[in-house]
Image (cartoon, rainbow, N blue to C red):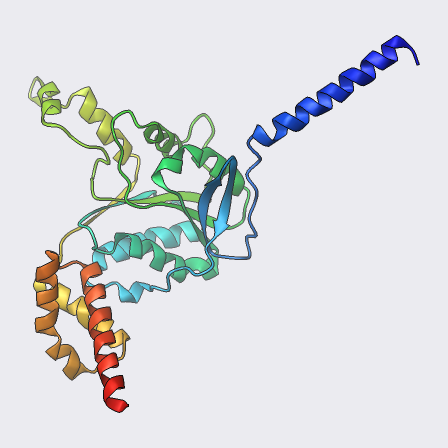
Amino acid sequence: MSDTTLQLASFLARAERLLARIEPLLPPASAEPDWNAAIAFRWRKHGSARYLQPVRRPSPIRLEDLQDIDEQKSRIDANTRQFVAGRPANNVLLTGARGSGKSSLIKALLNEHAPNGLRVIEVEKHDLVDLPDIVDLIEQRPERFIIFCDDLSFDAGDATFKALKVVLDGSIAAAPDNVLIYATSNRRHLMPEYFEENLETHRVGEEIHPGEAIEEKISLSERFGLWLSFYPFDQDAYLNIVAHWLRSFGCKEADIARAERDALNWALLRGSRSGRVAWQFAKDWAGTRRNARARRGK
C-alpha cells in the first residue's frame, strides 16, 4: 500500500470521527408527526429537537357552550368556515377581558370544523421564531391549519415580534393559503405603551400623526385582518353562564335558581364575573352537591 493511500485512509478515518462528534450537536430536521393521530398539535422543543406533538385529549368544549359572546362567535365562525372551504379568510386577533372565552372559542372552533379538515397548532410566544419552520412542515398538507398563539404580548426589542410580522404578511414568498394565525391577547396593540411615547405625536396641518414608537406597535395588530373585542360580563350574563354549566352537570332548574346567591358571592370573592369564574363556580357547586347526596345515600 502506497504512502498516499495510507494518508488518505488516515484522513478519512479522522473525518469520520470528527463527523461522529459534530452530528449530535447539529439541529435535526423537524420531524413530521402522525397527522392521523390527532386534530391538535403543540410545537415542542427538547434539546436540539423540534417537533409537533399530538394532543391526545383536546378540550371537548363546543360553540354552544360559549354564552353571551354571540357576535364574536358568529364573526370568527364565519371566517373559519370560509378558511376551511378554501375561500379567502383573515388572521384573527381576539383581545379583551380575561376569562371571557377567547381561547375557549378557538378550541370550540376546532371541534366544530375538524371533520372538514381543520387542525390547530398551538405555539408558545417564545417559539414564534420557529414559525417559518412550522409553515414549511404544513404548507403542502391538504388540511387547513390554524396556528394558535394564546395570551400574546411582546416586550420592546422582542425578536419574536418581527418573526410574527413576517409570517402574517409573508416575506418574499407568499404565505400559504392553508395557514392562518389566531391569537389572543389582553392588549389590542400587543406591546406595552408608555406615556412618553405620546410626546412623539405631531401635527401636520389638521392631522395628528403618531410617533414612530406607536406606529411600530400598531403595525403588528394591523396585520390581523379581523379584530374581535371581548368585554367583562354584567351580572345577568354571568348568571346565564353559571346556569348553562350547572345544566351541563345535570342540575335541576330549582337548584340552579337556588345557586344564584352563591354564584354572586363566588364572583365577589374572585373580583371578576368572567366566564372562567362561572365555570369554576359551577364545578365546585355541582361537585359539592353530588358529594352531599352521596353521603346521605350511604
- Quadrant of res 29: top right
Q: Is residue 245 above or below residue 29?
A: below
Q: Position of residue 64 (x, y in %)?
A: 29, 66
Q: Position of residue 79 (x, y in %)?
A: 34, 51
So how many labels did they put on this image?
0
**Looking at the image, which is closer to me, 93 or 12?**
12
Residue at the spot 18% in from the left edge and 72% down from the top edge = 243
Q: Residue furthest bottom?
A: 297
Q: Position of residue 271 (x, y in %)?
A: 10, 56
Res 153 visible? yes
Residue at the spot 62% in from the left edge and 29% down from the top edge = 23
**Looking at the image, which is closer to me, 7 or 56?**
7
Res 139 visible? no
Q: Residue furthest top?
A: 3
- Quadrant of res 149: top left
Residue at the spot 9% in from the left edge and 67% down from the top edge = 264
Horizontal side of 201 relative to 10 (left or right) equals left
- Quadrant of res 193: top left
Q: Position of residue 207 (x, y in %)?
A: 9, 23
Q: Is residue 213 above or below residue 170?
A: above
Q: Is residue 240 above or below residue 141?
A: below
Image quadrant containing the C terminus:
bottom left
Residue at the spot 13% in from the left edge and 75% down from the top edge = 259
**Looking at the image, which is closer to me, 229 or 123?**
123
Horizontal side of 280 relative to 162 (left or right) equals left
Image quadrant containing the N terminus:
top right
Horizontal side of 250 relative to 174 (left or right) equals left
